[in-house]
Image (cartoon, helix red, strand yellow):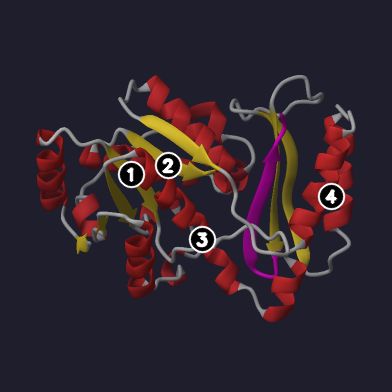
């Protein structure tokens, strides 16, 4: 396995694989990989002849005062994780390789990007859709893999692929959690020991929400209130949002009468964490 930095070399390898009749899976990441990413790579390895992992901290999906400049990196560790999971190569371009100096074309996600994270991160999903489109055009995979922790992102990418008639299968994979229930995230490294202990409140609150849903509760307001009340018991936690939306449409619903996403975004100290569950 090796690291490739250019679009030209990536396309050359993919072209050779295609000439051999091999299927290709793509796992897009921003690096600082963990077991959640490894689960995506492992599934891609099972379902494809060859697997590419992209590692690219995409500048256009970060807004002002977000953590682009300090986003964690550990390429040596990432390389070993990808190798152990069975990936064939890492595509790790510089920003200059992905975006011309006069780059001006973006992919807008529309209404599905206006709720949840789209409210507090208004440029985020335009950046995600644009870079994912570029990666799909570069690698031209048969399948592309995303985690459910970023459920809104998963829904947006599926909608984008459908709307733009992109010939790829988008596969969502389950959330991978720590033993205490915290969803694995590259941003967990930002948490101090006390904040790390406090962060389990997200899963605790969502577990209560799931209990209500499984018990037959259909009113979004009651679920939102129950989840919010539990999060509010943690002094280090500050709620960005707690909401119930249709899935995959990502529109607020008053009553759960369809598949729904119960999602939260919470600041633990200065670190913004997200988590969710999807109803049956």
Distance between the alpha carbons at the discs numbered 2 and 1: 6 Å
Q: Would you say 185 lies left or right of 146 here?
A: right
The quarter of the displayed image where residue 244 is located: top right
Q: Name the residue under label 4.
A: 228
Q: Are marks 2 and 1 in contact (CB under 8 Å)?
A: yes
Near mark 4 (Cα within 10 A), the count class, few <14, some 14-19 or many ≥20, is many
**The N terminus lies in quadrant:** bottom left
Please give the label number shown on residue 26. 1
Q: Earlier in the sequence, mark 2 or mark 1?
A: 1
Can residue 204 be seen from the camera position used here?
yes
Left or right: where 68 falls relative to 264: left
Give, as a single range, the part of the protein colored magenta: 268-280
Residue 65 appears in the picture as rendered: no
- Residue at the (58%, 44%) spot, across then down: 174
Residue 80 placement (x, y as % from top left): 35, 69
**Residue sitting at x 26%, y 41%:** 49
Counting other residues with Cα less than 10 Å from the Cα at mark 1, is it few (<14), some (14-19), or many (20 or more)?
A: many
Provide the secondary structure element on which disc 3 rests: helix
Percent x, y of residue 178: 65, 63
The CA span between labels 4 and 3 is 28 Å
């Amino acid at each position: 396995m090796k690291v490739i930095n250019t679009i030209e070399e990536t396309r050359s390898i993919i072209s050779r694989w295609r000439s051999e009749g091999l299927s290709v899976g793509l796992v897009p990441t921003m690096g600082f990989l963990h077991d959640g990413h490894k689960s995506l790579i492992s599934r891609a390895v099972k379902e494809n002849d060859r697997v590419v992992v992209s590692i690219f901290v995409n500048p256009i999906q970060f807004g002002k005062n977000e953590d682009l400049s300090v986003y964690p990196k550990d390429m040596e560790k990432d390389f070993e994780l990808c190798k152990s999971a069975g990936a064939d190569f890492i595509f790790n371009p510089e920003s200059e390789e992905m975006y011309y100096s006069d780059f001006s074309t973006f992919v807008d996600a529309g209404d599905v990007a206006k709720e949840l994270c789209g409210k507090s991160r208004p440029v985020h999903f335009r950046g995600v859709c644009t870079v994912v489109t570029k990666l799909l055009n570069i690698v031209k995979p048969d399948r592309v893999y995303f985690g459910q922790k970023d459920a809104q992102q998963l829904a947006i990418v599926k909608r984008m692929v459908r709307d733009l008639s992109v010939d790829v299968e988008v596969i969502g994979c389950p959330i991978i959690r720590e033993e205490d229930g915290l969803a694995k995230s590259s941003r967990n490294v930002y948490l101090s020991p006390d904040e790390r202990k406090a962060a389990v409140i997200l899963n605790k609150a969502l577990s209560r929400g799931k209990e209500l849903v499984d018990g037959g509760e259909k009113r979004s307001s009651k679920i939102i209130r129950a989840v919010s009340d539990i999060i509010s018991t943690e002094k280090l936690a500050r709620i960005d949002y707690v909401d119930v939306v249709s899935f995959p449409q990502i529109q607020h619903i008053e009553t759960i009468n369809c598949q729904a996403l119960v999602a939260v975004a919470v600041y633990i100290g200065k670190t913004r964490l997200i988590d969710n569950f999807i109803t049956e």
